[in-house]
Image (cartoon, coloured by chain):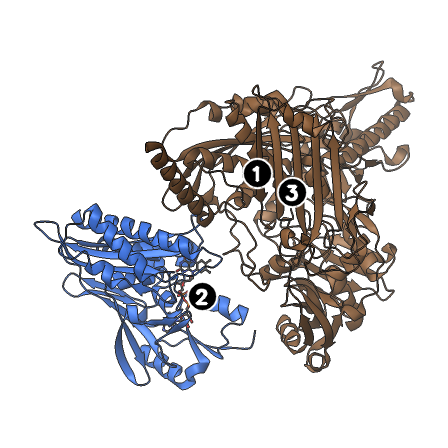
Chain colours: A blue, B brown
Amino acid sequence: MHAITYETPKSLDEAVKLMAAHGEKARALSGGTDLLIQLRAGTRRPEYVVNIKNIPELTRISFSLQHGLKLGAAVPCIEIHENGDMRKYYPGLTEAAHLIGSLQIQSRASVGGNLCNGSPAADATPALIALGAQARVVGPKGERMVPVESFCLAPGRTVLQPGELLVEFHIPAPERRASDAYLRFIPRNEMDIAVVGVGAALTLDMSDDRVVAARIALGAVGPTPILAAEAAKSLIGKPLDAAAIDNAARLAIAASSPIDDMRGTAEFRRHVVGVLTRRTLAKAAERARE
Amino acid sequence: MASDQSPEFKVIGTRPVRPDGVDKVTGRAKYGADYTLPGMLHGKVLRSPHAHARIRSIDVARALRLPGVKAIVTGADFPEVKGVMAQVGELIVNTHYLSLNVMARDKALYDGHAVAAGAATSKHIAEEALELIEVDYEALPPVMTAEEAMRPDAPVLLEELRTRLMAHRTDPGALEGPDRASNVPGHIRFERGDLDAGFRAADYVVEREFTTATVHQGYIEPQNALAVYDADEHLTIYCSTQGSFNVRTLTASVLAMSEGKIRVVPAEIGGGFGGKTTVYLEPVAALLAKKSGRPVKMVMTRAEVLRATGPTSGIKAKVKIGARRDGKITAAEVWLAYEAGAFPGSPFAPGAMCTLAPYIIENLRIDSYDVVVNRPKVAAYRAPGSPASAFACECVLDELAEKCRLDPIEFRMRNAAHEGAPQPAGPAFKKIGFAETLAAIRDSDHYRTPLNGPFRGRGVASGFWFNGGLQSSAIVNIHGDGSVSVVTGSVDIGGTRAAQAMIVAETLGIAVDEVRPVVADTDAIGHTDVTGGSRTALATGMAVYEASRDARDQLIGRAAKIWDKKPDEVVFEQGVFRPVDGSAPSLNLRQLAGRLARTGGPVVGRATVNAGAVGAVGNAFATVCIDVEVDPDTAKVRILRCTIAQDVGRALHPAYVEGQLQGAVAQGVGWALNEEYFYDQKGTLRNFGLLDYRMPTCLDLPMIETIMVEVPNPNHPLGVRGVGEVGIVPPMAAVASAIYRAVGVRMAELPMSAPRLLKAIIENRVTTFDAQATAAK
Ligand SMILES: Cc1cc2nc3c(=O)[nH]c(=O)nc-3n(C[C@H](O)[C@H](O)[C@H](O)COP(=O)(O)OP(=O)(O)OC[C@H]3O[C@@H](n4cnc5c(N)ncnc54)[C@H](O)[C@@H]3O)c2cc1C
């Protein structure tokens, strides 16, 4: 490990300036639960580490039924879980955040770090995609909004340019009779990494219970998290019965492109995409009807 | 459950707080990595990225020029060591290969094999130095499994190896087959009776093949060593080890030094399970210390632990067993191949000797092979060799029990070995408690409670382990105020300080907190073998018992002197010494201790024991019952309930005995479900961290219920049997049988991870569907 300069900016402006000044040599430090491991293993070798946990915009949760949710990129997962609005209106995203690591890890780890790390197996990412989250990115050249499903490019690579920071997520206000869910398969019961993850968000019709809107996202079954658009589209306008769910599960499998690795075979993963798509849809629907 | 306390004893069978406990839970205890010395350097090892490669040259010039770098060593710095077979705990070690494992010479034989090491003023500089060492490798094709390695055309790892039929564990034996380089250095065979006749007498014969994966002990604390030379060339090593005397012997042999020049100071140890019975860093740190003239400390990372320290063997097994309709086993034929890693010395012999040992089988043949492959050299792991071979045979027994329409416990009961029955390797058992463990499970609340619900199943299996005896020394010092210290050379892993203090307290009639147990270094106590082989409470306990009795006898002599009596005119009872004839008031230990100076000086009790060869000292048996629930869609297995019954001889400290049983079962469940080394095509280990090397967490296991069966060991003064290992033997087969009852598939490969199990479930569904379709036609 090499010597590193550590910075703790107090404002977004200051942070953006620091990041801009050091460009490729700088990396943001949120919870550090990915970054510290990479520093030790030598897989990332920044010269500047910029702590972003003291910047107001990055560390707050603001929610209203009119405007929806602004979730700071560096908010620790445990705060998401402890937030009543999050649990009520975005239970899928909340359970994804609450699955990450352990209580100790969640006290540091953030959803922003989860996404920026660029792992296809990141648990919060499919939940964000299912909710239609947009990432607000600020950099030397200004600001842009990036849909989360377009954020990751390859394992460990994202759309972030040198000097850019992810500030927060914008998530639409919840509709009535809408909800979300996230489920993953892990070999153990905690401290594990998703072999398959599926997030789903559903809006059901007030009168006839048909599907009005749906989004399904898959984790750990391709080089990036995947928006299973066809699978979700197949549900629109239909009652969420076994046939519709099975069909969506089949389309979700078709959208996945898993590989064989030490965590599971491609064959296993494809099968489990189907299983978890069914279960996640059922869970989201049950929540929407509550 | 056996009653905690026998009326014979006051202290033994109670549950006092362990003497080392507070320091450990408050972080004050010093583990290996906590030691520092002034002027200390930090050493790091450069490891081979190739599974199999010739080392053409190593250039360290650039590394040596880096400021802060004080020494670099490579294989060229190590003396050539002739092959001597040394017994290390339960394993036999060839010192030549040990030396090659510590530092590669002309060949790197596994991913992670040490090829050079550097010492520098900081760990980071040492790491940078390694990046500057240039190693010219010629990559060779890796040989990763026993099956591949045994093929006649397999690339050869070590040219000098020949296949030999061993007569005995320590005897390499005669050449078997042609005088040609081979990856199979050892073959051992045990046979008796007439196999053909035995199989002819069977109503059912089951024949299956099994595979188990390489698994690691998974101790929390990585290996470490701090080496320092005195001005007079004496070497002191501080390290976490299960056997400080073994570290001394093995380091001496690797460095061609006299043992008298080495002192090993054992630190507290964060787990070992057999993995810390050999040396990796110690000789390297010593050489770096010698070259640099400074103390050198080395601590492995988790990745180094997984890549380069000894796990236990993966095996390939072929098992054929026949039984009569009434459940009597008539014949068994077993073929086993153990992956040794890069150098000979897998537990293939104990694996052969343990499998089927719980049963009386007249017609038997067991062949077992030691096979070298491009993986790290295996080390001991809890009951080395027994769990993998037991998995294979116990699965077949479960299938036979089903064919005989017998309860799996009843089936085992009908074949159970007892006192006088011959073991697979020949010798007859002494008094053992195998049938008692079966009965304990059969009568347990767990077994008598029906398991209801879909996709749930219950499995039982049994296991055997020899238990070690070996050598121990103990000293009991009586202090002036009647308090006592007991000094041994046994590193305390599972609460053995507590057990030793309790034995002393029991023998001298004092309270356990008046006894201070001390673990001494190798210059301060007589030779003591490893804390391993379930031998410490047993054999060191025996030495402690004898040393306490020695002290007691001397104290009786002192009391006799005070009263002007003969020793046999003094009795010691209930903690007090008194003249038989009541002619003087009695003395308690405190009062007597105050008068030692005037009756001849201090009293020091001493004893040394050789508690016998491995296996001669009180064998262990366990039976485990496990309930599982399988998610039929994802094949994830949940352990619902788990009970182990084990013959523990006598539980000195029941809580720590229970802890041993539970720990063993927990490791067995990990072995069953998820643990495996995952190598890629090139022979590179991919899961070198604890995220992807999956041991169970506390959320993966229910409370493990324990039933301590106490059939006292006739070879031990207190009836103690080793308790630390055998519990790991049965769980894999118990889980496999439970899975079978839950979802109808018999798994023959470990681990039974979700992808493997799901594949089997789906294939079974297809087969069942086809069968039903055919039947419908
Ligand atoms: C024991 C353990 C268990 C874990 N279990 C899980 C699990 O169950 N599921 C899971 O998905 N992950 C898991 N992880 C991985 C990790 O905890 C998560 O990915 C976590 O969400 C990362 O968040 P962080 O805030 O710690 O990120 P950091 O490590 O701080 O950052 C990760 C990367 O993103 C960059 N970054 C962070 N924030 C920003 C920003 N705002 N703008 C630009 N770049 C940024 C950093 O520079 C770095 O490259 C585990 C990790 C550990 C150590």
> Which residue ends up furthest to the top in the rendered image?
B581
Per the model, the C-alpha gap separating discs 2 and 3 is 34 Å
Element carrying mark 2: loop
What's under tag 3, amino acid-wise?
Arg
Residue behind label 2 places its C-beta within 8 angstroms of ligand 1: yes
How many labels, in total? 3
Q: Is residue B338 above or below residue B511?
A: below
- The quadrant of the picture showing ligand 1 is bottom left
What's under tag 1, amino acid-wise?
Arg
Task: Give the residue number, with chain letter if any, for mark 1.
Answer: B208
How many neighbours does mark 3 have within 10 angstroms: few (below 14), some (14-19), or many (20 or more)? many
Cβ–Cβ below 8 Å for labels 1 and 3? no
Quadrant in the picture for residue B183: bottom right
Per the model, the C-alpha gap separating discs 1 and 2 is 45 Å
Direction from residue A9 to residue B290 in the image, left or right: right
User: Residue B691: which disc?
Assistant: none
Task: Give the residue number, with chain letter if any, for mark 3.
Answer: B382
At horizontal 42% and vertical 40% (from top left) the residue drawn is: B764
Element carrying mark 1: strand
Element carrying mark 3: loop
How many neighbours does mark 1 have within 10 angstroms: few (below 14), some (14-19), or many (20 or more)? some
Task: Give the residue number, with chain letter if any, for mark 2.
Answer: A34
